[in-house]
Image (spheres, helix red, strand yellow):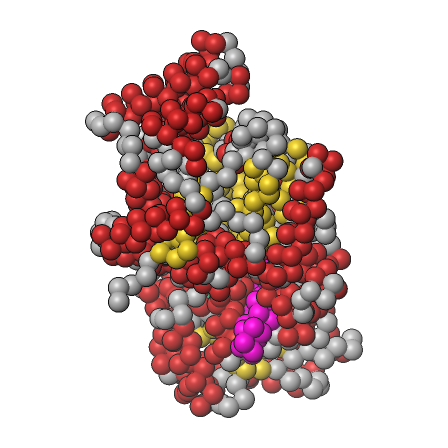
Amino acid sequence: MSQKYVYFFSEGNANMKELLGGKGANLAEMTNLGLPVPNGFIVTTEACNKYYDEGGVLSTEIEEQIVTSLAGLEKLTGKNYADPENLLLLSVRSGARASMPGMMNTVLNLGLTDETVAALAQKNERFAYDSQRRFIQMFSDVVMEIPNQLFESVIDEVKEHRNVKLDTELTTEDLKELVDRFKEIYKKEKGADFPQDPRYQLIESVKAVFRSWDKPSAVTYRRLNEIPSEWGTAVNIQEMVFGNMGNDCGTGVIFSRNPASGENKLYGEFLMNAQGEDVVAGVRTPNPIDELRKLNPGVYVELLGHAKRLESYFKDMQDMEFTIEKGHLFVLQTRNGKRTADAALRIAVDMVNEKMITREEALMKVEPKQLDMLLHPNFDQKKLAEAKPVASGLAASPGAATGKIVFSAEEAVERFNQGEKDLVLVRLETSPEDIEGMHVCNGILTARGGMTSHAAVVARSMGTCCVAGCDGITIREDDKYLIDSHGKKYTEDDYISIDGTTGNVYGEKIATVEAEVSGAFATFMNWADEFRRLRIRANADTPTDAKIAYGFGAEGIGLCRTEHMFFEADRISAMREMIVSKTLEQRIKALEKILPMQKEDFEELYKEMKGYPVTIRLLDPPLHEFVPREEPEIRALAKEMGLSFEEINETIDNLHEYNPMMGHRGCRVGITYSEITAMQTKAIIEAAISVNRQGMRVVPEIMIPLVGEVNEFKFVKEIIVSTAEQVIEEADADLHYMVGTMIEIPRAVVTADVIAREAEFFSFGTNDLTQMTFGFSRDDAGKFLRDYMDNKIYESDPFVKLDQTGVGELVKMAVNKGKEGRPTIKLGVCGEHGGEPSSVEFFHKVGLDYVSCSPFRVPIARLAAAQAALKEQGM
Ligand code: PEP
Ligand code: MG
């Protein structure tokens, strides 16, 4: 038997989303439930995939099934596409497995021909020609890809000629004129008359829906929402019902609860005597749904009943479309409604309280990523909808920022100190010297760099919004201007706005609102904690980060990048002195300046974490991030060190590396300069002894970075242990500490059993492990990864979402080998993936003990970990 590519609504159900798409499966389910759904059928997602597999050709087999189903639909409805007395007209709409609002197009009134229009006109002339001009325009635009502007300008011309503003003010004669002129446009563009065969119209529309699956905006939407291209879209073909046949007709959209606040009250709007597109187009202002109660109480009560019934059936807030045709209500669509994060939490918690769902079900309903919106300021959604992006880059750190442009970090600090509070830092890329400037700005925009570039990592850890790698803009830092992707120039007097959640950049000021954390948030997070197995720690480099992390529920610090403690202006010079030191003496002098600062920081960190574990990583500075580049800084450093400008310059030249990411960094620095390892150990141990004397019970975890060979580990460990023992003995203290390693080099993975015999814990550095496994630089990959994703070589950026097939296999291997070498080994991850939900699920499955992520992602990781545990139980 040949494969079935078309299903009538009565043949499907809500569980068939993969095959019928979300919209189709729900239409089928509503039909089965006996709701008033106009009849129809669905062309499956498998047909879409076949269409693509066969090079964009719709097979005769599928075509035949569609034509047969059309005949079946005529029988079912008792209507006919050739019978003006009982005319069957169709709507054709896309419907993928996940809803992609507004991403794909719709054709309405399909089936109209000159003949049926002429016959319809005998009864209702205006309705007939109005429907026909809408159909010709929609079909030409959506299906035949004739520029819509050609039609719009004719409408404008006719309106101008008549001196009217609204379509509704056009006379029947005007509408007839539009029909004629639209047909002329069609003929000119296509070299043929407008098609008069409904079957042909239908087949072409189905193909157009399939094609729309691959249009650039749909591809981008899929990438942002992690929807695989193999899913394909289904096509829903449904009998039209008319909301525009008079004043007893109408159409609208409702939500079973308020999608912005979550309030349990029907929410939505409608328009009488209108078709769906009139509501969307915003030409007429729709009325709030409450008014329908007064206007037509019967229909209102029926609608409310359907909304409640569907909500408890699907156990989720529903977003529905309806039409009233001559007083009769029809439901055209239902789906789980999109909602703000606030609403998502309130609805989840309310539904548990209403006993509609269990806690477990509630936890599965909220997208972990959505929690981001609760933690950062956001754009006023109304204002955002009115703005148009002028460029876009990587959504590197969530949130919204608006402010005047500033092109250097120093100037940012200056302008901030002079009272300018709303600034956006715009740089080609950022470096550690920029840190203070980054701090005072509302957001950071860079033209270069990927998701793990300096700007992105630092912005995330500060909770500052950031768009990175925005290569569509041209930045002239020295001349202080930028040019957007449309060629418009902006100077430091201009405002821009950036959206770190979408990567969009806007050339104007957009109002922002502070994030609100509702009471439901805390309740919900406590539920998540009940179900998760993974512990959640934070990557925190400063006491401020640690405090935020603790507030968001972190159960320890999984990574303190000690080099980041030297970003601030008064400290970076000590760090630079150490880096450019030529002699041991110089280095020890610089280290002596650093020691008290480190010790104080560590004490503060321990205190902020209130007894939770703290992993401190020994220095891992890719040196190029720290050496001064500008002449005044080099001169200042020379002065401080009592050396000449030339001498320092020469040292800097000698420090130059062709490939700093694979250069003198990580434990390699601590091996060349063992005094650095000793100083850091001293600070870590002394700080722990000191806070323990104040009543805490800290067990510091000292972590060695970038190990690839057990002898490297042993070498550094020996210095750590001998220094620590000496400090403990001299202090006459009793302190337990651990020594472990990052696993971030493939060789460390392969030899993990041997390393585990020496190391008490492993923490996966998946940023470097991804870099080293793929062989592309973290700093440069942003430049070409976009092309990889556009060409579907990768579905997602492996620096954001763990590459489970490659890098993930290495993680698994190291876990197994690590346990072989030391059964009690403690396992965690501290790369950026530790806060990405699908990666968290993976880490849960492979049996890590904890994940560590930036403070602002702690709640996300808590929820993702709970969902991973629940999924394992079959939720
Ligand atoms: C890593 O490589 O994953 C890591 C956490 O270390 P860093 O990003 O500091 O190199
Ligand atoms: Mg690393």
Tell me where residue 393 appears, x and y as whole percent: 44, 44
- Name the residue at 40% across, 81% down: 813
Residue 13 in the magenta stretch? The answer is no
Residue 7 vs residue 65: left or right? right
The residue under the point 69% across, 65% down is: 356
Image quarter of residue 826: bottom right
Is residue 857 in the magenta section? yes
Q: What residue sits 57% from the left and 56% below the top?
A: 34
- The part of the image, by quadrant, that contains residue 583 is bottom left
The quadrant in which the C terminus is found is bottom right
Q: Is residue 780 above or below residue 179?
A: below
Q: In which quarter of the image is residue 592?
A: bottom right
Residue 175 drawn at (x, y percent): 43, 19
**Region in magenta:** 849-875
Number of marks drawn:
0
Work out which residue is located at the far right of the displayed protein and give it. Answer: 695
Does residue 637 show up?
A: no
Residue ID at (45%, 82%)? 815
Coordinates of residue 870 in the picture (x, y in percent): 58, 74
Q: Where the N terminus falls, by quadrant?
A: bottom left
Relative vertical location of residue 471 with respect to residue 5 in this rendering, above or below? above
Dominant SS of magenta comes to helix
